[in-house]
Structure formats: structure tokens, C-alpha cells
Image: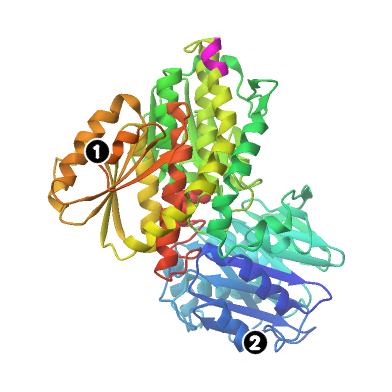
Amino acid sequence: MCGIVGYTGDQQAAPILLAGLEKLEYRGYDSAGLAVRDGERVPEVVKAKGRLRALAEKTDNGRAMRGNCGIGHTRWATHGEPSENNAHPHCTDDRSVVAVHNGIIENYQEIREKLIKNGYTFYSDTDTEVAVKLIDHYYKKYNEGPLDAMARAMMRIRGTYALAVMFKDYPEEIFVARQDNPMIIGVGEGESFIASDVPPLLPYTRKVYYIGNQELGRLHKGEVTFYNIDQEEIQKELVTIEWDAEAAEKGGYEHFMIKEIHEQPRAVRDTLNSVIRDGHIDLTEAGLSDDVIRSLKRIYIVACGSAYHAGVAAQYVIEDLARIPVRVELASEFRYRNPILEENSLVIIISQSGETADSLAALRLAKSQGVPTMAIVNVVGSTIAREADHIFYTLAGPEIAVATTKAYSTQLVAGYLLGVQFAHVRGTITEEKYEELLAALQELPDQIAKLLEDDKERIQWFAAKYANAKDVFFIGRGIDYAVSMEGSLKLKEISYIHSEAYAAGELKHGTISLIEDGILVVSILTQEALYEKMISNMVEVKCRGAYLMGLTTAGNYNIEDTVDFAVYIPKTDEHFTPSLAVVPLQLLGYYVSVSKGLDVDKPRNLAKSVTVE
Ligand code: G6P
């Protein structure tokens, strides 16, 4: 989704803004723009459709835009097609107000009509231009300055926004406002920054403020003041970001995705080590006491995309080990179906970004019904992390590729840790089993590393062979079905090959009619009790012409009698096999996309952080 950057200081703003937007490219966008001003002069606005490269060329890498104060934007179209005209920044005709915006103004039509009556005209199809002109309207009508105009606009606007605004009469200053869309303010020596996410700030500063909902900020060079919507000054805590700048760079890898795949052993180890202390799982930092765990009657896991798939895996683990009923739901469904949340329930929201609009709405819905909430989140200080009652941070570090890999892997591990600990506290597993499970968990990082070492080239070869496939099926039973869903999503989102995940036993009920000669069926079978059932399902598709890839545990070598291409994962406890099985599937998606010459890290139409519903 849209990315925002801003700068005011003594350096030239445009190159800093462009570099910042480059770091936000992963969010997904289809046009970009900058507004930069030199002292008291009105801002110069330059926009370009398509990749950031086009904007960089147009501005001679920013050198052609002089000035020390500016805002920038990458736009992911919501209102109006991707075009230069609809790209941000948007401004009034006299450029007295210039702004960038991330989010959606729901009542923009109604406001637009009001403004037309007041003599305004519109050059774009965007809701943002409406917001800019509304601010301008209040600014000129009441003559009470930028904060007043913005606060009035905030009261009139329905929807979500992260707004950064420059006013002609206020050189070297940027005004910001926020409602449900991410925005971070960084401060350095004599300079201040705005960004939608941490990576653009890292080369300059680690000192940041998180601006809250319905709050405003006024940025001067190296100094920021915050206000509530009544324009009363409020104090905010200056937070230090721990991520290092290198973590947000490609570090010699061709793409972020492959770099992040290789970071999984580290990410999983860090996440495990954050809660395993002296041979025990300790969830006190998440604030989950043993009494709360014992009282749980039901768990709801709510998430979107891959985080939802991690939730499906967690459901199998928690139900099987801790015997607590778990229901997993897509956040976009949960939030509108008026769910009945029983007493002694826990709602767990899983989200890498901590900003996904539907997941955030689901969290708020649960809270409004008085149900305790827990968030499994990667981005520290994100909205979901701040609003949940309990927080379990996954320690994946910054994830840049749109297709998640390491964050998903850490979400899986968070789910296992909860399952094992809930089981231990509730006495549904023995002390011996607990120790066994903990030992198996701690082996996972090395096992993932080994898989990456052993399998990469074979999968690369196989991916090149299947790069022209039209349809692919992923099948599995039990927890392998959860992995099938993630494997299928990985392939389709970055290779644009249609693929579907099916519970293997369900194929016969319709889908098998799609199987024809040469179609690739990726079968995952890591569960001993389901192994033979899976083989039967695989034979059913094979005899109808399918080409079979089998993904199973080392030792099941007889699989080679059935499949055309076998991949083995190391032995682990059967609850934890998703962490290993997903690795070859991530590699498969990655290498198919590379073979097809596609934009692996920034697949078309997708966004990393989906801040609109
Ligand atoms: C987007 C991303 C997915 C991600 C989903 C949920 O669609 O492209 O990779 O799984 O959002 O995001 P979250 O940040 O809540 O985990």
C-alpha cells in the first residue's frame, strides 16, 4: 500500500526522499511523486507513473529539485487509475497546501460536493485531493493556522489516513496527522523525518516517535511537537529502534526474498530464544499467566494471508497438544459476521506488519466485546501491537519482500510455543513430552539451515522445468494441509501461475476433474498416521496423468515408487514439520518466479502491508 516519506533539515531533501521511497517499494505501488521546497518558495511537485526509476530519472536522482524540506509518496491506486495525474503529492491550485496521504477517505464524495459549492475544482479522481482542499478550505476560512485546519478536517473526514502536509506560509515545517495508517516520525541532529515504516529512517536515525490515532504532529528541523485533536500539546516517548540498517539491505543476495529465506534459521532461533529460558517456556513477558492459560475454554485465531496459514497450523498444534478448541478465521470475514465470542476465550491476532486493516478491525471487535486479545506481531510499535492486551513479538527483523517467508516461519514457531506451553500448564502432556518437544523446537533452526544447503540446487532445477506450468495443485492432510495453503500462495503470488491448495481427501469431490496429463501436483506427507491415506490420494491423481512431487520426511524412501520427484525434510516432532516442509516450497515459488524473469520482491498488484480493507 502507499508509502510516505518526509524530510526537513539542512540537507537536500529530494535525494533523501527518493532513497526513502526506494526502501518502501516493497509495500507495492504504481506511481510516485515528490514535493520539495526551497526556503519560502512554493513547493515544486514532480510525479511519475510506474516505477520509482521513472521519478528518479525525471528529477536527475533528486538533484534537479532544490530545497531542504519535502514530502514523497508511492501510490497504490484505490480511487482512480494509476496515472501521473492521480499520483501524489496533491495540492491546491496556488500550492498553498501540498500533501501526501496513505489510507482511504470514505466520505470523500460528500466532501467533494461541499467543496465544489465553495468554488473548488478537482483535477484528479483521488480522495486525497479532496482532503487537501478541505484542509485548504478550513485554513483560509478560519485563518487559525495549519493545526486548526487539519484538526477541523480530521473531524469532518471519515476513514483512515496518514497525512503529511506542507503549508506555503510555514517554510521548513511539515504537519502530520494519523488515523489507522502507519506513520513514524524520526529525529536526528537538526533534521526530522517521516516514514510509513522503519527502513527509510535507519540510515539517518534510530530515534523515533509513534504518532497515535487522532493525533497531529508538527515537524521542525530536529524537533517535533505533538497535539491531540483539540490542539493541546501532548508528550510522546522517544523510542530507539533496535533493527540494524543492514537488515533492511539485500546484502549481496539477488532479491530480498531469497535473503529472507536464508535468514530463517536466525529468525526462528531468535524467536525461540525470546521465550525459552532455562529449559522452560516463559510467557510472562506476553502477560499470559498460568491462571489465564488454565481458564481458557476456546481460542480464536484471526489473521490474513500467510499469517492466516500460520494460524491454521497453530490450530492443529494447540488443539492436539493442549486440547483447547481453536477456531481460525480470516479477519475480513470475522469482523463482519457478528461472531459469538464465549467467556474465557482468547482472541489471537497474527500479523507481520501489525497494520493490516482487517486484522486491526478484528482485534478491536474482540476488545469491544471484552474478550482478552493477544497479538503475534513482527513490527514493534505497530498499531496491533500497541492495542492488543498481550503481545508476542516474532523476531524476524524487517521483512521487505512482499511474499513473506521468515515472518511466516516465526509465526509458526510462536504458534508451537503457545501450543506446547498451554499443554504443559494444563497438564495435557507429560513432563517428559514437554522436554522432548522443547528439544525438537530448538533443533529447528539448524534443520532449516541444512535443508537450505541440501535442497537449493535440486529445487532450482525442478522450478526451471516447471516454470511454464499453467495450474498446480498442492495437497496434504492434517497440518500438511496448512503447509499446502502456504506453498500454493507462495507459488501463485510471485510466479502468477494458478495454483490451489486442497485437503487431499477432498480432491475427489469435484477438483479431481481438473487433473489432466502433465499437471503438477505437489503432495506433502509428513504425518505418519496419514501417510498411506496420502499415498492413495496421490495415486488417484497420478493415474489420471498428474506429475507428482512428493515432500516427506527422511526415511520414507518408498515414496519414490509413487512420485516423479521427491524432496525430504529432516525428522522432527510431527507438530513442527510445517517449519521444514515450507522451506522447499518457498524455494520452489522463488525459483519459478526467477526463471520467468518476474519482479520477485514486488509482484504485480500486491502490497506488503494492506492498510485498506
Ligand atoms: C499481505 C501480504 C501477505 C501477508 C498479508 C497479511 O497480503 O502480501 O504476505 O500475509 O498481507 O499481512 P500481515 O502484515 O497482517 O501479516
Instruction: Give the SS element for disc 1.
Output: helix
Q: Amino acid at mark 1?
A: Ala
Q: Badge 2 local density, few (<14 within 10 Å), some, or many (20+)?
A: some
The spot of residue 308 in percent (x, y) is 42, 42
Q: Amino acid at mark 2?
A: Thr
In front here: 499 or 328?
499
On the image, numbered disc 1 is attached to which residue?
504
Residue under the image location 59 percent in, 75 percent down = 137
Q: Is residue 118 visible?
A: yes
Say left or right for 535 vs 186. Answer: left
Say left or right for 491 vs 538. Answer: right
The spot of residue 127 in percent (x, y) is 48, 70
Specify whether residue 432 is painted magenta: yes
What secondary structure prevails in the magenta region? helix
Instruction: Give the SS element for disc 2.
Output: loop
Q: Which residues are magenta?
A: 431-435
In front here: 434 or 581?
581
Q: Earlier in the sequence, mark 1 or mark 2?
A: 2
On the image, numbered disc 2 is attached to which residue?
59
Residue under the image location 70 percent in, 76 percent down = 167
